[in-house]
Image (cartoon, helix red, strand yellow):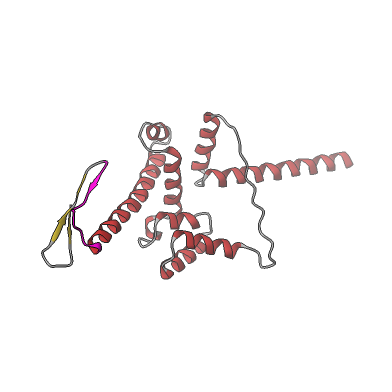
Amino acid sequence: MRILGRRAGRGYEVSRDQTSLTLPARLPIDVWLRIGQNLGATVDSATWWLGDWLVYGQERYPERYRKAVEETSLDYQTLRNYAWIARKFPPGRRRPALSMQHHAEVASLAPQSQDSWLDRAQEGGWSRNELRRRIRSAAIPRAGARPLAVELRLAVTHARRGLWEDAADRANCDLAEWMLAALDAAARTSAEDRDRIRVAEAG
C-alpha cells in the first residue's frame, strides 16, 4: 500500500499482512493520521458489509445460515447485531460520515427520529458517545423522574437462546426488543384471560 505525502510525488510504503501493519521509520504525522483515518473507514465499512452479508444469508438460506455462520471464525452475536442494524438502515439511509455505532445508538427509534438524530450528529460532528449522551438527556422526563432501569439475568440453554434469536431475526428486531415484546404480549393475554374469567363468574 502506498500513501502519498504532502510533497508532490513523495509516497510512503506501508506493508501489511493478516496480523500486522509495518510503517516506515520516519513518517510525517499528517501521513500517519491519514493512514489511521483510512483504516478506520475500512473497519467501519466492513461492519456494514458483514451485516449485509448476514441479511442476505438470512433471506436466501433461512434453514442453513446460522450453522454456516457458526462455522466461521466470526462471533455470531456480534454478526446478529450488525445484521439488525443493517436491516434498520437500508443503504440509502446510511450516513457515510457516521460510524455503524452511531446508527446503532438510534436503531431502536422510529425512522423519523433516527434520521433527525443522525442529521444532528453529522452536522455537529458528534462522537458516538456524545450522540448517546444527548439521546439519553432528551429521554429524561422534564419533571425530573428518571426512567426505571432493570437488569435481568437468565440462565438458558443454547437451544432455547437459538430459538429466541431465530424468532427475533424473523421479527426483524434485536433479541432484547423481541423479548420485551413477547413479555408484553404474554402480560396482556394473561390480563385478558383474567377479565374473561371474572365476567364468566359474574354471569
* Magenta span: 19-29
Residue 164, located in which quarter of the rendered image?
top right
Q: Whole-percent x and y of residue 92? A: 37, 59
- For image coordinates 53% across by 39% down, the residue present is 167
Q: For this rendering, which residue is in front, 10 or 105? A: 10
Residue lying farthest bottom? 123
Instruction: State the quadrant of the C terminus.
Output: top right
- Most foreground residue, 49 or 151: 151
Q: Residue furthest right?
A: 202
Task: Find out whether residue 23 is within the magenta segment.
Answer: yes
- Left/right placement of residue 108 relative to residue 12 reads right
Q: In the image shown, does 2 or 119 lie closer to the viewer?
A: 2
* Residue at the image point whose x is 20% and y is 58% from the top: 27
Q: Is residue 203 visible?
A: no
Residue 110 or 118: which is nearer the viewer? 118
Measuring 43% from the left and 54% from the top, which residue is drawn there? 101
Position of residue 9 in the picture relative to residue 20 (left or right):
left
Does the stretch in magenta take in 121? Answer: no
x and y percent of residue 81 in the render?
45, 46
